[in-house]
Image: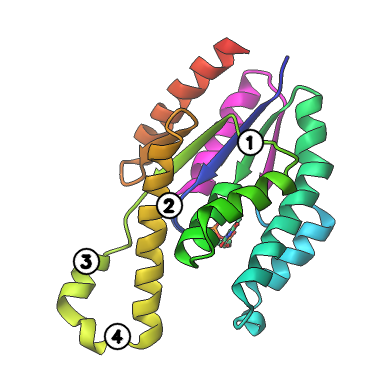
Amino acid sequence: MKGLFITFEGLDGSGKTTQIALLSDYLKRKGLEVITAIEPGGTALGDKIRHMLLDRENAGMSHKAETFLFEASRAELVSKVIGPALGRGKIIICDRFFDSTIVYQGIARGLGVEKIMELSLWATDGIVPDLTFLLSVDVDGGEERLSGSSKSRDRIESEEDKFKQSIYEGYLELSRKYSDRIILVDGKQDIKKIFGQIKERIDRELDKL
Ligand code: TYD
């Protein structure tokens, strides 16, 4: 069997972890071999890079350094885990992949979509997910808070909302551009309903293998 590479994308708190667990269980119950991974991380080196990226002490990291660290973690994950697993016909489910870098660094940080795409394809040796589920939730209560108390929020809080809003919009833009690969799922629906939509799409994909 040809391998299948599935990724999940969305804002923090969009429910990716829950849906990945449900999908992994579902596929395993069908007797399929499933490997799950998380970005950044998923390898010994990648876990160290993840620590560097999430460490608050590195808060002032330059946007380009941040980008290269995400790509370095990804290159290691592809060469050590994803590439070999696909070669053995396995199913890989990854929590985030290069669409995150396109949206977070390329769009929200302003480094440019084309540049990030080029770097990402170089890091992955051209490996692109077969299917990407975008769990879309808008910026949590953002509009409500903005309308009421915009003056009382500090610089960082407003930056955060702006940053998240551009991520939300960036993801939507990406899902329109790559509509054959990226499946937009309304992440505000209940867990079962969301999984029903994912399952239906996955079943169709499995029939093709
Ligand atoms: P994590 O704790 O894994 O968050 P989540 O559960 O939402 O995936 O932290 C990863 C953070 O890194 C998350 O805020 C998204 C961000 N990120 C990027 O900015 N660029 C990337 O390429 C990736 C993979 C993640």
Quadrant in the picture for residue 163: bottom left
x, y percentage for residue 18? 50, 45
Quick check: is the Cβ at mark 2 less than 8 Å away from ligand 1? yes
| Residue at the image position 50 percent from the left and 68 percent from the top | 109
Q: Which mark is residue 14?
A: 2
> First in sequence: mark 4 or mark 1?
1
Residue 174 vs residue 159, the one in the foreground: 174
Pointers 2 and 1 in contact (C-beta within 8 Å):
no
| Residue labelled with disc 3 | 143
- Give the answer, above or below, for where 201 lies relative to 77: above
Q: CA distance from mark 1 to mark 3?
A: 34 Å
For numbered disc 3, what is the local secondary structure? helix
At label 4, counting other C-alpha atoms closer than 10 Å, the crowd grade (few under 14, some 14-19, many 20 or more) is: few
The relative height of residue 132 versus residue 73 in the rendered view (above or below) is: above
Q: CA distance from mark 2 to mark 1?
A: 22 Å
Q: Which residues are magenta?
A: 14-37
Q: Earlier in the sequence, mark 4 or mark 3?
A: 3
Gap in angstroms between the C-alphas marked 4 and 3: 13 Å
According to the picture, the residue beneath numbered tag 1 turns out to be 128
Residue type for callout 2: Ser
Q: Earlier in the sequence, mark 1 or mark 3?
A: 1
Choose mark 4 or mark 2, whichever is in front.
Answer: 4
- C-alpha gap between disc 4 and disc 2: 24 Å
Residue type at mark 4 is Arg
Q: Nearer the viewer, mark 4 or mark 1?
A: 1
Type of amino acid at the residue the image marks with label 1: Val
Which is more toward the observer, 26 or 131?
A: 131
Q: Nearer the viewer, mark 3 or mark 2?
A: 3
| Among the two numbered marks 3 and 2 on one chain, the one whose residue lies closer to the N terminus | 2
Q: Amino acid at mark 3?
A: Glu
Asked if residue 148 lies left or right of residue 79, the reply is left
